[in-house]
Every structure is written in C-alpha cells, then in structure tokens.
Amino acid sequence: MKVVFLGPPGAGKGTQAQRMAKRFAVSHASTGDIFRRAMAQGLRLGLEVADYLDNGKLVPDELTSRVVAEMVIESVEDYILDGYPRTIQQARDLERMLLERGEALDGVLFFDIPEDAIIERLTGRRICAQCGANYHIVFMPPAKSGICDRCGGELRVRSDSSEQAIGKRLAEYREKTLPLVEFYDQKNLLRRVDATAEPDEVTRRTEILLRDVLMSRQTGT
Ligand code: AMP
C-alpha cells in the first residue's frame, strides 16, 4: 500500500494515519514526526529545520523530498505518507521518485474540514516532552491532566500551536497545499473524508475508503 493522507493541519489525519498504519500493518511516515524527532535528538537535520517548524513555515521542498526519499521511498515497501507532499513541487518529486522505481501511488485521502474547526483543534494540542506522544485537551485528553499516559512525561503545548504560528500554517496550507486537491483529483486518485465527524467515526470511514483503494488496485479498476 502506498497512500497519501492530505489535509489541513488539525484535520486529524495524523491520528487516522497512526490508526490505519496499525490496522493495515504498514508504516506511518509522517514528515512532521521525522523533523520533530530529529530536533529532539539534536541531529543536523533537526538544526536545519527547527526555525521553519517553530514559525509554522514549510521546510524547503528539496530538503523535505530528500528526507522522504531516504527514509521512506527507498527503505519501506508499504506506507501511509502523512504530511507529504505539501506542495505541487513535492508532489512532482514524489511522482518522479516512484516512477524511477516502477511504482505508483494507490490513492490519496483528503481530510476535509472548515477552518474554524481547525483553529479550535490546534490550540488544544499537547505533546509529550519525553516520548513525543500527541494529545488534545478536548478530543484526546490524557488520563491525568498534563501527564503522558504512555511514559509519565510532562505534556507541553507544541511550539507550532501558538495562535500566531497557526495563522501562518493555515496561510501556507491555503496557498501551497490546497492546490494538491485539484492535482490529485485530475489524476483520479483523490477520495474525500469528512473530517468534522468524531475521531472513531472518521476512522470507520477511512478504513472503508482504504479497503476500497486496495480493492481497486487488485482489480485494476
Ligand atoms: P505536521 O506535524 O505534519 O503538522 O508538520 C509540522 C511542521 O513540519 C510543519 O508546520 C512544517 O514546518 C514541517 N513539515 C512537515 N511536513 C512538511 C512537508 N511535507 N514540507 C515542508 N514542511 C513540512
């Protein structure tokens, strides 16, 4: 399975990608997670991308595509790409990388949600300072406020979840990522998921769509 999860920040695509990766036993390849992990580990990549992430700006296409090529396309067979591609240039890079290997995308799921719902979601995001697990104070709260269920670490507001950074991320999304909906629709790869429903319902619908994507691949329809 080679699929892309597309959508604005805060659409819940990361949570769904995590769940689907488990259900279909494929890799969850999140560029945001890769960058944050590199920052937390003090790697050179982390230093290169920190300013962009802290300011809600996109990391340059060339660097992002290089990281995806090395860590995903060339090293994993089945994956859900979460947060990549985010620009038309990245989508072209991805197409070329796959083509060179005689591969192709099976489908693109677009998690559709209006902006006011996004803002409510993003300001409530928390992340564990120790292990990186994600929470939300309303939609996915930890058992004990401020404490990670998984490792007992301290939960913090993500550095890119201030109102100012959110505004910038949404503007970047509108300008650079939204055109991908049209791009993939024209290639007949796009399927829409209504991401305003509650998480378990979105999971149910996402799973149905993914099964459908796999079926069409097998039957070639
Ligand atoms: P995410 O966790 O997907 O919201 O990503 C967090 C941040 O990582 C984004 O705001 C960008 O700064 C950076 N990032 C993640 N994926 C990409 C990408 N495909 N292209 C450029 N920047 C990215």
Image: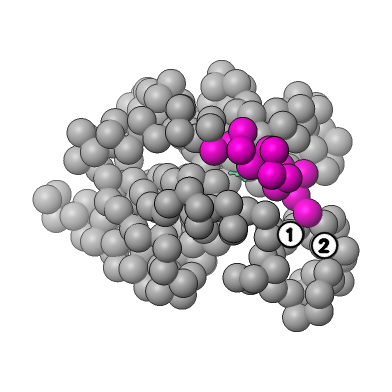
Q: Amino acid at mark 1?
A: Arg
**Which of marks 2 and 1 precedes in the sequence?**
1
Say which element carries label 1: strand
Q: Residues within 10 Å of mark 1 (few under 14, many from 20)?
A: many
Image coords of residue 180 (percent x, y): 36, 33
Say which element carries label 2: strand
Say which residue appears at 69% left-offset and 44% top-offset.
Answer: 163
Would residue 88 be counted in the magenta stretch?
Answer: no
Say which residue appears at 44% left-offset and 46% top-offset.
Answer: 7
Q: Amino acid at mark 2?
A: Leu
Q: Residues within 10 Å of mark 2 (few under 14, many from 20)?
A: many
Residue placed under numbered mark 2 in the picture: 155
Query: Which residue is more in the foreground, 220 or 32?
Result: 32
Q: Judge whether 155 appears above or below 147 on screen.
A: above
Judged from this view, the residue extending furthest toward the bottom is 143
Please state if 212 lies on the left or on the right of 148 as rendered: left
Residue placed under numbered mark 1 in the picture: 126
Quadrant of ligand 1: it is top right
Image coords of residue 159 (percent x, y): 77, 44
Mark 1 in CB contact with mark 2 (< 8 angstroms): yes
Q: Is residue 190 visible?
A: yes
Say which residue appears at 61% left-offset and 38% top-offset.
Answer: 167
Say which residue appears at 14% left-offset and 55% top-offset.
Answer: 219
Q: Judge whether 151 appears above or below 129 on screen.
A: below
Image coords of residue 145 (percent x, y): 81, 75
Q: Which mark is residue 136?
A: none
How much space separates mark 1 and mark 2, taking CA atoms? 6 Å
Q: Which residues are magenta?
A: 157-170
Please state if 178 lies on the left or on the right of 82 as rendered: left
Q: Is residue 24 visible?
A: no
